[in-house]
Each structure stands twice: as structure tokens, then as C-alpha cells.
Amino acid sequence: MKKNIAILATNGFEESELASPKAYLEEQGWNADIVSLKSGTIKSWKDGNWSTEYNVDVVLDQANEADYDALVLPGGVINPDLLRREEAAVNFVRSFFESKKPVAAICHGPQILVDADVLDGRKVTSFFSVKNDLINAGAQWEDSEVVVDHGLVTSRNPNDLPAFNKKMVEEIKEGIHERQRV
């Protein structure tokens, strides 16, 4: 069955953390839309420098969670910080939890989950520098390449992408997760 996946990102996302999951999702025969704050392109970050621009498929104010089966949140230092400042982005993320759909976040990506208020009691991992933010939001943080908690998939960094991609697809194939919660 064909799936539609939203990848929420803006300028400053870690290139591999968007490109690798997007390619892996498309290898499944699924659609993976880049959803962003504005139309046009967004610029990636790679090896400490600006890198490739990616086309935005859907502008956030026109995106609807009901059109998607799951959500992917790439990291990068700049990207999640810009997204979490936007109420529409936070609400979009939260809507996937309210609908009990899979959400996958890697590296700094889980930072927006703090603002969406969906971490209390959840097992997660992330880039080590945001560990305390997640713990302070009620999460149970662990240092593992991938952590899955009822449809929520998290990983630490680009080195974890193979495990992250595999678990992300597994959770999406499972569909709705009744224990996914806000």
C-alpha cells in the first residue's frame, strides 16, 4: 500500500538526515513530501557549511496531517530551532501524535517535540547536547542508536541512519499506534 510521508524541515537541516530517510522512504514506493515554512527551496547544512538546496513540496500552511501516514523530523542545529519558533510547525507535529501516527526524529530533530509537549514519559534518544532538554520535558533519554516507543522513533546522529531508516519504515508499515499519545 502506498504511503504519504511528511518531512518537516527548513533552512539549516542536516543534509544526510533528510536525504537518507527521504530516499529510503521512496525506495519503499512511498511518497515523501518536504513540508516547510515557505515555498521554493530550503538549504541544507553539511560538514559545517551550507550545502545543497532542496525543493519544498508543500508549504506548511497548506499541509494537513490527515494527508499523511507519518512524519519525519530531520535534525541539524538550525532547523529544529527555527521550526519550534513557529506555532504552525509545533501544531503540525502535535497533530500526528493526536492522530496516533508514527513520528521519526533524529539528532536535534526531537527538540520540536519539547514544544509540542509530547515527551512526558516517552523513551527517546537524540544528539547528546539536547539530552537535558528532552529529560526536562519528561522524556526518558537513553544513549542508543535507535529508540522506539509506540510509534515514536528517535536516533542520535547521522551514523545511526541505517537503523533509524529501518525502524522508521517498520513503524510506518504498522500504521496507527493506539499507544501513541500526546
Image (cartoon, rainbow, N blue to C red):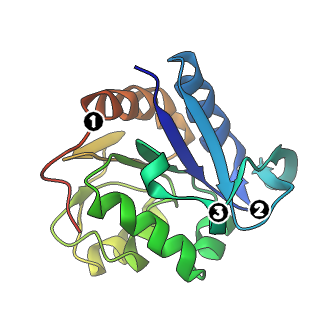
Q: Amino acid at mark 3?
A: Gln
As rendered, which of 45 and 98 lies closer to the eye? 98
- Any part of residue 99 in sight: yes
- Foreground: 93 or 149? 93
Q: Indicate the secondary structure of the residue bearing disc 2.
A: loop
Mark 1, Cα crowd under 10 Å, few <14 / some 14-19 / many 20+, is some
Element type at mark 1:
loop
Identity of the residue drawn at 58% across and 31% down: 31
Which residue is labeled 3 in the image? 62
Is residue 77 at least partly visible in the picture?
no
Tell me which amino acid carries mark 2.
Asn
**Amino acid tagged 1:** Gly
Q: Residue at x 35, y 75 (%)?
A: 132
Query: Which residue lies under the disc numbered 1?
Result: 175
**Distance from Cα at disc 1 to Cα at disc 3:** 23 Å
Q: Are marks 2 and 1 in contact (CB under 8 Å)?
A: no
Task: Tell me the residue that label 2 is attached to.
Answer: 11
